[in-house]
Amino acid sequence: MEKQIILDGKHVAKEVKDSLKHRVEALKEQDITPCLATILVGNDPSSETYVKMKGNACGRLGIRSMQIHLPEETTTDQLLDQIIALNEDESVHGILLQHPVPRHIDERLAFDTISIEKDVDGVTTEGFGQTAFHFGRFPSCTPAAIMEIINFYNLEVEGKHAVVIGRSPILGKPVSMMLLNRNATVTVCHSKTENLPQIVQQADVIVAAVGMPKFVKGDWVKEGAVILDAGYNKGNIGDVDYDSCVTKASAITPVPGGVGPVTISMLLKHTVLSAEMKS
């Protein structure tokens, strides 16, 4: 096997954010400050942490972070009213509704109320359709991060067999479409897939997006495969059993420090792009 590459997401994220600095400065010279509005409903501690992290990331780049915290008992209609107000606010360039929302809220309706021009987190069904047709400006941020890592390290995907484990509407499905648009041959696996290890053994590229710690085992992986671990489980553990897979892979993302940091940088990149489109 050729020399192995540890795909350093922190380095990729730094390169992305460094490339945004002059773009933010250029917008401010036009009296435009890119603004990301985040909506948090309820008091989930993990969600509060994620929102705070995103706000801090915005601040370091000079992006305005508007944080809206709604009570647990907020109704779907009240949430929709808040989203519509942000859609109409010309100073806001991106809207992020933190997932998950309380169970009594219609989350899909709320996501789809976000204006396509401000859907910087890539959660609307219209945005997914645009991504599938290869003209979406704001794909879901984790799939965008995976493609950014592939681009940064010049990993070959054209003609390769990519196996995506997971079919969520903001990760497994869109990354499958994005790989397909790059001329990979894509197999999508999920909880009902039979003979999963045998299918994964055929993969040149593995995207693990199943939400189960250490799910992908080393004996599932063929020699020289590229592994992109999009999982993030309790205890900073990915969906891939790193220790058993790292000896088989030609390139692999660690957890933490792999896809995660790049995901946040994609959110910032999309917010800046939205502001540029408005300017």
Image (cartoon, helix red, strand yellow):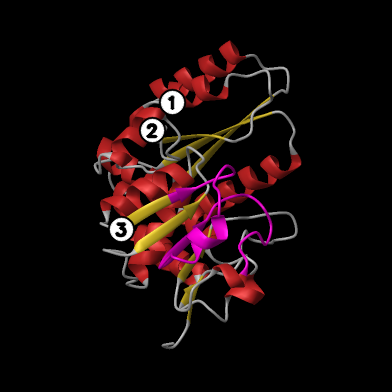
Q: Could you tell whether 256 is left or right of 226 in the image?
A: right
Q: Amino acid at mark 1?
A: Ile
As drawn, which residue projects farthest toward the top?
77
The numbered mark at residue 179 is none
x, y percent for residue 221 = 53, 70
Compare residues 8 and 269 and report the one nearer the observer.
8
> Image quadrant for the N terminus?
bottom left
Q: Is residue 31 visible?
A: no
Compare residues 26 and 69 and report the one nearer the observer.
69
Mark-to-mark CA distance, 1 and 3 = 31 Å
Mark-to-mark CA distance, 2 and 3 = 29 Å
Q: Main secondary structure of the magenta part?
A: loop
The residue that label 3 is drawn on is 184
The residue that label 1 is drawn on is 114
Q: Is residue 189 above or below residue 218?
A: above
Q: Is residue 190 above or below residue 87?
A: below
Q: Amino acid at mark 2?
A: Lys
Residue beneath the point at 48% across and 51% down: 142
Q: Amino acid at mark 3?
A: Ala
x, y percent for residue 203 = 43, 65
Magenta segment includes 193: yes
Compare residues 265 and 240 and report the one nearer the observer.
240
Q: Secondary structure at mark 2?
A: helix
Q: Which residues are magenta?
A: 188-217
The residue that label 2 is drawn on is 118
Q: Could you tell whether 272 is left or right of 86 in the image?
A: left
